[in-house]
Image: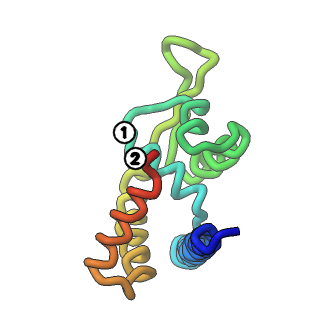
């Protein structure tokens, strides 16, 4: 193995470590501060960005998870009054899901606090560091 490939392998391990650490902190933040989970946040964020009802299949594709995983999360969000499911008018076999007004307001609060928590997690980085890392990671993912 060349020195260059060893360094890239170490970089990969460092990236995984940073990602896992930040994700663990965000999961704990959501659990403790909001009695919520990262999958709930992800579903609500996807529906928030979309702003129109989408099918459960579309939602699972956007989140890159199985329909079963999305169904379980949507079930809990619906029970909490944060999302609503409705049959599609064009295809009664299709169920559409969207945020309720309460879900929209709840997510906006959650998103602000999530953003602040991400800022706290990476607070040791200067703005220049963030810009440099962003540039480097963009170049690393271009093929």
Check residue 48 in the rendering and tell me which mark sits there, or answer none: 2
Asked which quadrant contains residue 128, the reply is bottom left
Is residue 108 shown left or right of residue 74?
A: left
Check residue 51 in the rendering and tell me which mark sits there, or answer none: 1
Return the residue found at the far front: 2
Q: Please tell me which residue lies in front, 40 or 17.
A: 17
Q: Please tell me which residue lies in front, 51 or 5.
A: 5
Q: Please tell me which residue lies in front, 55 or 126.
A: 126
Circle 1 sits in a helix, a strand or a loop, which is it? loop
Asked which quadrant contains residue 85, the reply is top right
Q: Please tell me which residue lies in front, 132 or 62.
A: 132
Q: Position of residue 114 (x, y in %)?
A: 42, 69
Check residue 2 in the rendering and tell me which mark sits there, or answer none: none
Is residue 48 shown left or right of residue 95?
A: left
- CA neighbours of label 1 inside 10 A, class few (<14), some (14 to 19), many (20+): few
Q: Position of residue 39 (x, y in %)?
A: 60, 56
Q: Is residue 6 above or below residue 51?
A: below
């Amino acid at each position: 193995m060349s020195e260059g490939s060893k360094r890239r392998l170490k970089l990969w391990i460092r990236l995984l470590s940073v990602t896992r650490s930040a994700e663990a902190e965000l999961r704990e933040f959501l659990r403790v501060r909001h009695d919520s989970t990262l999958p709930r946040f992800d579903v609500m964020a996807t529906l928030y960005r979309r702003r129109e009802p989408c099918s459960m299949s579309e939602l699972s594709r956007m989140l890159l998870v199985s329909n079963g995983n999305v169904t379980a999360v949507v079930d809990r969000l619906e029970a909490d009054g944060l999302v609503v499911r409705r049959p599609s008018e064009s295809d009664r076999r299709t169920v559409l899901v969207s945020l309720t007004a309460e879900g929209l307001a709840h997510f906006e609060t959650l998103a602000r606090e999530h953003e602040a928590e991400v800022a706290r997690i990476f607070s040791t980085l200067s703005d220049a560091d963030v810009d440099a890392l962003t540039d480097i990671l963009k170049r690393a993912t271009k093929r």
